[in-house]
Amino acid sequence: MPTTWRNEICARAFATLAAYRPVARAARIAAPLLVCVAARDAVTPPGPAEKASRRAPRGELKTYPIGHFEIYHGAWFECAVADQVAFLARALRLAPRASDGQAARASVADAA
C-alpha cells in the first residue's frame, strides 16, 4: 500500500534546534521517565539519552544491544514493548501480571 509520508523537515525547524538541550533539562522532569536506548545506535548516539535518564529524578534506563532500527520489529520490538508496559504498570502502580515480559524475553533469548 503506498504511503503519503515524506521524510522531510522544514528549514525553520533548525532555528530552534540549537536551543534544544534535553540532557540539561532532564533534572526538571518530575514524572517517571523511561529511556530506551539501542547501544549500537549509529543514528542517535546513546550517550546523551543515557545521561538524561541519569539526571531525571525518576529516570529509568533500558539498554538493548542492537542498532537504531532493530527495536522497531521482531523479538527486540516485543522485548522493548514488554519493558515499556512493565514501566507503565510501575509508574501507574498497576498490579503486575505474572506473564508480563516473560514471553518477549523468551523470544529474545531464542533469537540470540
Image: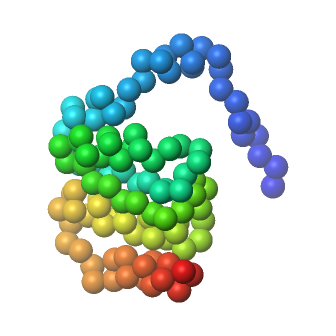
Q: Please, which residue is most extreme toward the right here?
A: 2
Q: Position of residue 19 (x, y in %)?
A: 42, 18
Task: Name the residue rendered at 41%, 54% in the picture.
Answer: 36
Q: Nearer the viewer, residue 29 or 40?
A: 40
**Residue pictured at 54% horizontal, 62% vertical:** 66
- Location of the C terminus by quadrant is bottom right
Judge whether residue 107 can be spotted in this image. no
Residue 80 quadrant: bottom left
In the image, residue 7 sits, relative to residue 33, either above or below, namely above
Residue 99 in percent (x, y) is at: 33, 83
| Residue nearest the viewer, comparing 87 with 64 | 64
Locate residue 69 relative to residue 39 in the image: left or right: right
Image location (x, y in percent) of residue 104: 45, 78
**Image quarter in which the N terminus is found:** bottom right
- In the image: residue 82, left or right of residue 16: left
Q: Is residue 108 left or right of residue 73?
A: left
Q: Is residue 86 visible?
A: yes
